[in-house]
Image (cartoon, rainbow, N blue to C red):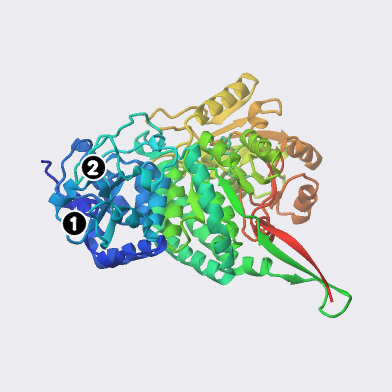
C-alpha cells in the first residue's frame, strides 16, 4: 500500500470515493447529469473537484511511483461529465477514464466482481459521450436488463477511472456501447483495480511549460474518426440550439461569462503555465475578453434581428432580411492570445445559433479545454461546443470534415493550406493570419514617451502578437536619441519566470521559434546590422531569447520582411514622411501600421494611404471588440469582432412578400 498525505488522500477521495451517493440521478439527460453532479458536488465536498489540488496530488502520487498497477482502496469515481471529458482528453495516468460501471443499489462489491457485463469499457471520448446519451435515453440500461436472468432495476451510472489511458486508436469500427459492453479479452476492472492499457502506442500531445521545459500533461489527440462523430453530433444538436432563440442562448453565454470571471485567476495561470505569457498579461487578457463577451451578448441579438427593408403595406411587394446561422463552424486557433483568438469567433458563432468545433492550438490546449469545460458547466450543450485536440493533423482533419465554415487563426503558410482544403467545397472561410506591422516615429515626438509606447507595442507578450511592431522607422533627425531611449526601456525589461508578478517578458511559447530568431538576427548582422541590445538565446531550461534591438537594418534582411514573432525588433532610419510611407508599405502583410506624432492630421494623412486593416495613432498592437479586425493581403481574409464579426456567422435570407 502507498502512504498518502491527508491532502493526497482527500483528492484521491474525489476520484475513488464510494460511488452511490445519488441513486435518483437516473434517468437523466446528459445536461441534467452534469447539473446533478454539480449540485451533489456543492453538497458534498468529498467529491468536489478542484483542478489545481488534483494536479498537486497527482504530481505527488507520480513522485511516489503510483501509476500502473496500484491497488486502491476504493473506486476512482468521476461523476462529472466535464471531468470525464477532461480525464480522457488529458490522459493523466492516474486520472484516466476507462469505463463506466453501472451500480445497482443492492449490489455488493463481491457481486460486482462476478458481473462483468456491467462494466463497459470506453474506447474513446466519443464512446463516453454516446454512452452517456444512451444512458440518458435508457437504451444502455435496456441492453443490460435484457440479459438472461436480469430483472428490471434502477441503475446508477458511475464513471470509473483506473490507472492508464486507453488510447483512442483502440476504438472499434462502430464504437457503440452495445458492442463494447462485453470486452472479450479482459477481466472487468472492479473496485479500484487498475488495468494495463491494451495498446501502448502513444496518441497524445505532450504539453510542456515553455519556461522550464517541464511536462505538464499529455493530452489524447482527437483522431479523424472521433472528429467525424463530433461533427455528426454537432449537426444533430445545432438546429435545437438555434431554435432556442437568442434570449436563451444569450442567457447561457452570460452564465459562461460569469463562470469565466469567477475562475479568471485559474484560467490566467493555466495559460501562463502552458504558453509562458506573463501572469499580469494573462490576467489582462481574461478580463478584456470578458468585456468582449459582454459586448457580443448585448449587440449580437439586434445585429441578426429580422430587418424590414420596406415599410409594410407601402408597395406591392414587402421586402425583409432575416439571418440564419451558417451551421457548423470549425475554429482552428492560435496560441498567442488564446482567449481573444478563441472567443472572438466562438462567442458570436454560438450566440448566432451555430454549433462550434474548436481546436485550440497545440500550445494552448489546456486553456482551450478549460474554456470548453466552463461552457459546458455553464449550460451550453455539450454537442454544440466541442473541442478537438491536436496539432496540424487534427486541424487538417477538422477542416476536411463536413463543416460549413472555418475560422482559422495562424500563420500565412498554414492559412493558405486551410483555404485550399476547403475551396472545392465552397466552405465559408475566415483567415486571421500573420503580420509584419510597421511603425513610424516622427521628428516631433516626446522621445521618452514614444520610446515607451513603441517598446510596449513591440515587446508585449514577448513580441508574440500578430500585430506587434516588427519594423520600426524613425525620423533621421531624432534617430540616435530615440534608439538610446528605446534601448534603455528594452534593457530594463524583466525577463524571467512568467508566474512572477514582476515579469515583463516570459519564454517563447514555441521552442522552434528560437531558430527563426537566431536566423533572422544572424542574417541581419551578417548584412551589416548592429546589435544595440540582446541578440542571443538565454541559456536556461525552456525557450528564452533576450529582448533585442538592431539598427542599421534594411529591407533586404529577413528581419524586416518575414514575421519574427519574438522579442526582436529592427530599427531603420527614414528621411521624411514620404520615405516612411514607402517603407511602411514595403511588405506583403497588411494587418496594421502605427504613426507616433503629436500631430493627428499628419498621422491620419499617412495612415489613410496604407493598405492595412488597422491604423494606429500613438498606439500599436491593440484590438477592440467594437472595431472590425480584418487583415489585408497576407494577413487574412474576412472580419472578426464588431458588427461585421457577428454577421460573419450568419447567412442572409431575402424575403419578397407579395401582398
Ligand atoms: P500555425 O499556423 O502554426 O497554427 C495555427 C493553427 O493551425 C494551430 O491550431 C495548428 O495546430 C493548426 N494547423 C497547423 N497545420 C494545419 C493544417 N494543415 N490544417 C489545419 N490546421 C492546421 O500558427 P501559430 O503558431 O499557432 O500562431 C502564430 C501565427 O498566428 C502567427 O503568424 C500570428 O501572426 C498569427 N496570428 C494571427 C492573428 C490575427 O488576428 N491575424 C492572431 C493571432 C495569431
- Residue at point 59% right, 33% down? 564
Q: 631 and 30: which one is in front? A: 30
Q: Quadrant of residue 185?
A: top left
Residue lying furthest right in this view?
316
Q: Which residue is mark 2?
A: 188
Residue 25 appears in the picture as rendered: yes
Neighbour tally class for label 2: few under 14, some 14-19, many 20 plus, Cα within 10 Å: many
Question: Relative to residue 438, is residue 259 depicted above or below?
Answer: below
Q: Is residue 599 above or below residue 657?
A: above
Does the rendering let one see residue 347? no
Please state the quadrant of the image where ligand 1 appears.
top right
Please name the residue shown 79% across and 37% down the image: 582
Relative depth, front residue between 24 and 313: 24
Q: Residue furthest front?
A: 148
Residue 228 lies left or right of residue 317; in this view the side is left
As drawn, 619 above or below 153 = above
Quarter occupied by the N terminus: top left
Q: Nearer the viewer, residue 616 or 425?
A: 425
Q: Residue at x 21, y 37 (%)?
A: 63
The percent position of residue 162, horizontal first and vertical second, equals: 25, 43
Mark closer to the chain start, 2 or 1 = 1
Of the 4 image quadrants, the one containing the C terminus is bottom right
Q: Which mark is residue 18?
A: 1
Amino acid at each position: 500500500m502507498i502512504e498518502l498525505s491527508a491532502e493526497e488522500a482527500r483528492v484521491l477521495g474525489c476520484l475513488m470515493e464510494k460511488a452511490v451517493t445519488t441513486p435518483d440521478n437516473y434517468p437523466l439527460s446528459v445536461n441534467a447529469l452534469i447539473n446533478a453532479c454539480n449540485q451533489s458536488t456543492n453538497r458534498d465536498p468529498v467529491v468536489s473537484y478542484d483542478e489545481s489540488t488534483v494536479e498537486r496530488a497527482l504530481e505527488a502520487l507520480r513522485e511516489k511511483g503510483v501509476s500502473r498497477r496500484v491497488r486502491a482502496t476504493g473506486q476512482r469515481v468521476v461523476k462529472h461529465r466535464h471531468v470525464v471529458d477532461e480525464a480522457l482528453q488529458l490522459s493523466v495516468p492516474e486520472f484516466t477514464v476507462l469505463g463506466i460501471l453501472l451500480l445497482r443499489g443492492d449490489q455488493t462489491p463481491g457481486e460486482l466482481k462476478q458481473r462483468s457485463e456491467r462494466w463497459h469499457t470506453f474506447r474513446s471520448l466519443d464512446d463516453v459521450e454516446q454512452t452517456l446519451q444512451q444512458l440518458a435515453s435508457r437504451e444502455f440500461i435496456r441492453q443490460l436488463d435484457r440479459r438472461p436472468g436480469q430483472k428490471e432495476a434502477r441503475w446508477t451510472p458511475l464513471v470509473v477511472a483506473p490507472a492508464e489511458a486507453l488510447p483512442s486508436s483502440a476504438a472499434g469500427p462502430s464504437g457503440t456501447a452495445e458492442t463494447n459492453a462485453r470486452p472479450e479479452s479482459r477481466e472487468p476492472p472492479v473496485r479500484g483495480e487498475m488495468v494495463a492499457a491494451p495498446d501502448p502506442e502513444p496518441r497524445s500531445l505532450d504539453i510542456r511549460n515553455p519556461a522550464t521545459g517541464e511536462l505538464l500533461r499529455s493530452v489524447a489527440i482527437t483522431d479523424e474518426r472521433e472528429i467525424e462523430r463530433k461533427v455528426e453530433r454537432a449537426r444533430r444538436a445545432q438546429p435545437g440550439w438555434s431554435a432556442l432563440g437568442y434570449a436563451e442562448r444569450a442567457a447561457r453565454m452570460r452564465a459562461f461569462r460569469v463562470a469565466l470571471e469567477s475562475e479568471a485567476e485559474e484560467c490566467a495561470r493555466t495559460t501562463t503555465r502552458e504558453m509562458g505569457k506573463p501572469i499580469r498579461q494573462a490576467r489582462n487578457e481574461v478580463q478584456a475578453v470578458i468585456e468582449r463577451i459582454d459586448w457580443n451578448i448585448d449587440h449580437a441579438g439586434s445585429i441578426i434581428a429580422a430587418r424590414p427593408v420596406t415599410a409594410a403595406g407601402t408597395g406591392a411587394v414587402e421586402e425583409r432580411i432575416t439571418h440564419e446561422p451558417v451551421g457548423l463552424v470549425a475554429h482552428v486557433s492560435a496560441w498567442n492570445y488564446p482567449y481573444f483568438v478563441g472567443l472572438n469567433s466562438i462567442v458570436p458563432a454560438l450566440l448566432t445559433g451555430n454549433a462550434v468545433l474548436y481546436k485550440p492550438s497545440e500550445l494552448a490546449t489546456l486553456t482551450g479545454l478549460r474554456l470548453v469545460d466552463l461552457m459546458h458547466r455553464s449550460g451550453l450543450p455539450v454537442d454544440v461546443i466541442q473541442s478537438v485536440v491536436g496539432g496540424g493533423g487534427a486541424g487538417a482533419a477538422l477542416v476536411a470534415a463536413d463543416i460549413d465554415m472555418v475560422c482559422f487563426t495562424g500563420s500565412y503558410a498554414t492559412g493558405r493550406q486551410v483555404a485550399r482544403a476547403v475551396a472545392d467545397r465552397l466552405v465559408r472561410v475566415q483567415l486571421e493570419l500573420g503580420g509584419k506591422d510597421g511603425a513610424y516615429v516622427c521628428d516631433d515626438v516626446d522621445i521618452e514617451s514614444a520610446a515607451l509606447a513603441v517598446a510596449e507595442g513591440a515587446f508585449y507578450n514577448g513580441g508574440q502578437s500578430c500585430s506587434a511592431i516588427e519594423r520600426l522607422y524613425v525620423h533621421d533627425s531624432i534617430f540616435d536619441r530615440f534608439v538610446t531611449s528605446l534601448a534603455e526601456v528594452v534593457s530594463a525589461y524583466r525577463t524571467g519566470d512568467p508566474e512572477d508578478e514582476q515579469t515583463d517578458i516570459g519564454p517563447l511559447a514555441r521552442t522552434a521559434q528560437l531558430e527563426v530568431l537566431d536566423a533572422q538576427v544572424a542574417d541581419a548582422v551578417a548584412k551589416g546590422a548592429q546589435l544595440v541590445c540582446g541578440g542571443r538565446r538565454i541559456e536556461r531550461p525552456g525557450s528564452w531569447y533576450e529582448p533585442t534591438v538592431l539598427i542599421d537594418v534594411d529591407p533586404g534582411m529577413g528581419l524586416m520582411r518575414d514575421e519574427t514573432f519574438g522579442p526582436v525588433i529592427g530599427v531603420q532610419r527614414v528621411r521624411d514622411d514620404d520615405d516612411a510611407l514607402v517603407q511602411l508599405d514595403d511588405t506583403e502583410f497588411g494587418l496594421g501600421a502605427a504613426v507616433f506624432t503629436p500631430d493627428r492630421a499628419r498621422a491620419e494623412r499617412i495612415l489613410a494611404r496604407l493598405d492595412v486593416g488597422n491604423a494606429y495613432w500613438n498606439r500599436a498592437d491593440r484590438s477592440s471588440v467594437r472595431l472590425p479586425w480584418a487583415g489585408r493581403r497576407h494577413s487574412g481574409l474576412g472580419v472578426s469582432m464588431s458588427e461585421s464579426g457577428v454577421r460573419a456567422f450568419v447567412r442572409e435570407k431575402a424575403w419578397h412578400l407579395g401582398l
